[in-house]
Image: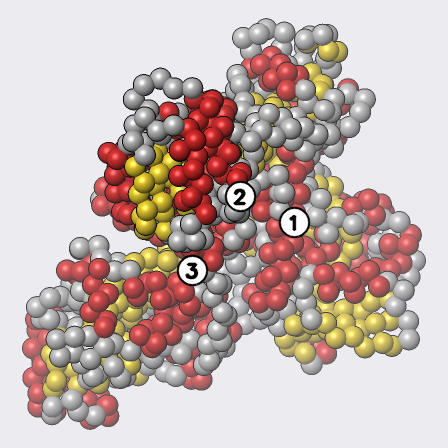
Amino acid sequence: MTEAPTPDDAATPTTTPAEGDVARAADGERFPRHWAADVLAADGGVVHLRPITPSDADALVRFHEGLSERTRYLRYFGPTPTLPPREVVRMTTVDYRNRVALLAWLGDDVIAMGLYEGLASAGKPHSAEVAFVVADEHQGRGLGPVLLEHLAGAAAENGFTEFEAEVLSENPNMVAVFKAAGYQISRAFDGSTVHVEFKIDPTDALTSVRNARERASEARSIANLLRPRSVAVIGASTDPKKVGHVLLKNLLDAGTTGPVYPVGQARSVNGIRAYERVIDIPDPVDLAVVAVPASGMTDVLDDCLVKGVKTLVVVSSGFGELGPEGLETERALVRQVRAHGMRLVGPNALGVVNNDPEIALNATLAPSIPGPGRVGFFCQSGALGIAILATAAQRNLGLSTFVSAGNRADVSGNDILQYWDTDDATDVVLLYLENFGNPRKFGRIARRVARKKPVIAIKSGRGAMTRVGKQGERFGAVDDRIAQMVLAQAGVLQVDTLSDLFDAAAVLAHQPLPTGPRTAIVGNSSVIASLAAHTARNSGLEVVRQVDLGPGVAHDDLADAVGAALDDAEVDSVIVVFVPPVAVDAAEYARALMGAVAGCSAPGSKPIVTTFLAVEGIPDGLSVPGEAGTPTRGSIPSYPTPERAASALALSWRYACWRDRPDSAAIELDGISAEHARSYVRELMSDGPRELTAVETATVLAWYGIDIVEFREARTLHEASAAARELGFPVAVKATGPDWVGRLDREGARLDLGDATAVITAFAELQELTGETMLHVQKMASKGLGVCIKATEDSSSGSVISFGLSGRLFESLGDRSYRAVPLTIDDAHDLLAEPRSAELLAGGAGEAPADVDSLIDLLMRVSALVDEIPEIRGVNLDPILSSAEGTAVLAAQISIGPVPALADTGPRRLR
């Protein structure tokens, strides 16, 4: 008979990198592959980190010889012009456990090094001494905190909890690096040195600092893209039909403020001197727009590294869009670009636009672009991008910036969101999503951005963010619903079509947010007004006034009615319906409408939309033009139908409601031993990905304060009888196989067994029926409503938690709610309230209501478990009996596996 152990019964191992997580260097030497990472420096440039190997000896010697005398003195506490051979061997030969060293590479050169060495010999088994040094020309790029972050991640995996360092008193910058990395340090002075100690365990404060550093570096990398001081067009051509010619022409036609350099075979292009190679350009180049075949990329990248180019926009096709072979070529391109310290937009990209007059950048293939505005737009497809730009121009919707990332091999929507977060020129963010990229990271960033500016997303077709499998359509429907809930959780406004996207952008970019749902409809058609009212009510607005002025209304009467509605304290927003049956002077009515807004008691305080002559976009007469002539805030958007006007206004109200909802207060969950659970799971991972046994699952859950109703495993009649007496009657005997758990007929369980005879009889029956040799004997729990909580790794949305009633019937009906990890308290409440069957939690028909607080606590604990231990790939608590007395978890299952490539935990890195 096996008993589920308590957490204190299990050992806490010192983990080592799993055999399956070991990579080889170019010379065949092995190191933990997940420690290798592309990272961003503070200036937005890319640096490659990887563990050191003996074959790096020559590069390490060159790195040391290139350090200034002052830098060597501060690192080694004395003059060290050369590294003795024995020291080179010692530094390059590490065990990746007690001694770890990371090198930062740019091209073929080492530009920084960090290492730690355990202090077990000094009686400190959980402490390690850390040190690092950065090449002089790369100091000030924030590489110290990045190295420290990744060293701490490796050390934590190996069981270390604390770093120590010896620093010269005359080197205050080194102490500042530790503090800048987010650690709480303690210092002790000893003459000429300072002894520093700090815990490396992740804390909320440390995570906040890491995220802020990530945000700043990613935003800077996109600023390098969108605000270049100079641009080179590689592949520029004199042939007007060639892509390189179009790119150069569009840059010149836009009036790009910095110099533009053609690079190609011709001596001049468009009357501008051309250069054969980018390294021949005499001045610095920030951005290179590349239109050469995939086969010519290597030479281009080498030249760009030498030239110091920061970002590439590759419009060339022939990569991942062609299939597996093209995808491998694309991945090789990304590796090369990052190894050269650059970021990549594309390949197969349409390009980028920045309408800031100080930049005037049109590095795209689009024949025309809209004028300056306050809207940022991100998409992937080049063909779609051309249509987007044309539609925006047609609707008179100005853009601040536009990025079409093509195959999105490097720069993604997450990077652009980081830039828009702090971009004062962008008030509204539009996303055309084909997938989330890193969904956990997307949710984190989008939630933060949406608190300041609306983020509107359209998904590229039904099921576009879904898994592909044998059950295609069913998975598609489920994943589509998950994606919708995850977007809503992050505050992202969702629309179904491009038309809806631009409708929403028009009102959010030009009108204030409603302060309430109360809406007045003023117009010259009762029928059209009724259509607007119907849509408004169905979309969450309250129609409190409906004024019909008649089809022949004069412009003064229209202005008076609109002004009265705007001045009405019981009205929060106004829809103006104006579609006259005969030709009228549109300019006269437009002036009257704008005058009504300007003449009300609080101009610009309430949103107003219209169906002005069924025009789509911002009519000239309803525009408040900016310096560039495009509409600015205060312009009134018009829609061709009343339904679209009402829907756009309702979306604005939904966003206002979400933004006004206060952030959930942080909560402290007691009874959690995260380190014990993490170490135990990593020990179990030595056997590879698998589902944990019931006893192992109970052990992990107990460390997070989640108790399964006490049970015993029994294989014989004697063990079953003894287990029942130990647990106390009544008990249940249950089969554990997948064919027997959760059956509606409950054939896999025998319940309410009141004595040993009943237990023995039930045990024998179930063994014969199921063919299982091991069954569970479990203490009976109080009756309650059966619910289930699951955490799964969704291919499109990342780690998500679902809630619903227990049983295959409810699962087949799809009555589940979903939220992305990590949950807030508000998310947990939404999870409980969203299923159609949620009303059963309130009781009724003689049943007491369920203990919602205990369910909330359980959801938060499952969220913390999955969030803090990413090796846990699935959790299934089913069934859970919820009653007025609390919750009882009857069964649970945990699956473990490698940390997902798109996890949002640990040291920050590029995907």
Residue at 70% x, 77% y: name it: 121
Name the foreground residue: 714 vs 453: 453
Residue 437 seen in the figure: no
Name the foreground residue: 336 vs 397: 397
**Amino acid found under the numbered disc labelled 3:** Val
Give the percent coordinates (x, y) of residue 737.
Answer: 19, 67
Tally of numbered tags = 3
Neighbourhood count class around disc 2 (C-alpha, 10 Å): few under 14, some 14–19, many 20 upward: some
Give the percent coordinates (x, y) of residue 53.
Answer: 66, 51
Q: Give the distance between the C-alpha atoms of the residues marked 2 and 1, in whole angstroms.
A: 37 Å
Left or right, residue 289 beside residue 537: right
Q: Which residue is mark 1?
A: 216
Which disc is residue 603 wearing?
2
**Amino acid found under the numbered disc labelled 1:** Ala
Residue 713's quadrant in the figure? Answer: bottom left
Which disc is residue 821 wearing?
3
Residue at 57% x, 67% y: name it: 204
Quadrant location of the N terminus in the rendered image: bottom left
Sequence-earlier tag: 2 or 1:
1
Residue at 41% x, 65% y: name it: 826
User: Which callout, 2 or 3, points to the residue nearer the camera?
Assistant: 2
Residue 260's quadrant in the figure? Answer: top right
Q: With respect to residue 331, does 417 lie above or below?
A: below
Q: Secondary structure at mark 3?
A: loop
Q: Are marks 2 and 1 in contact (CB under 8 Å)?
A: no
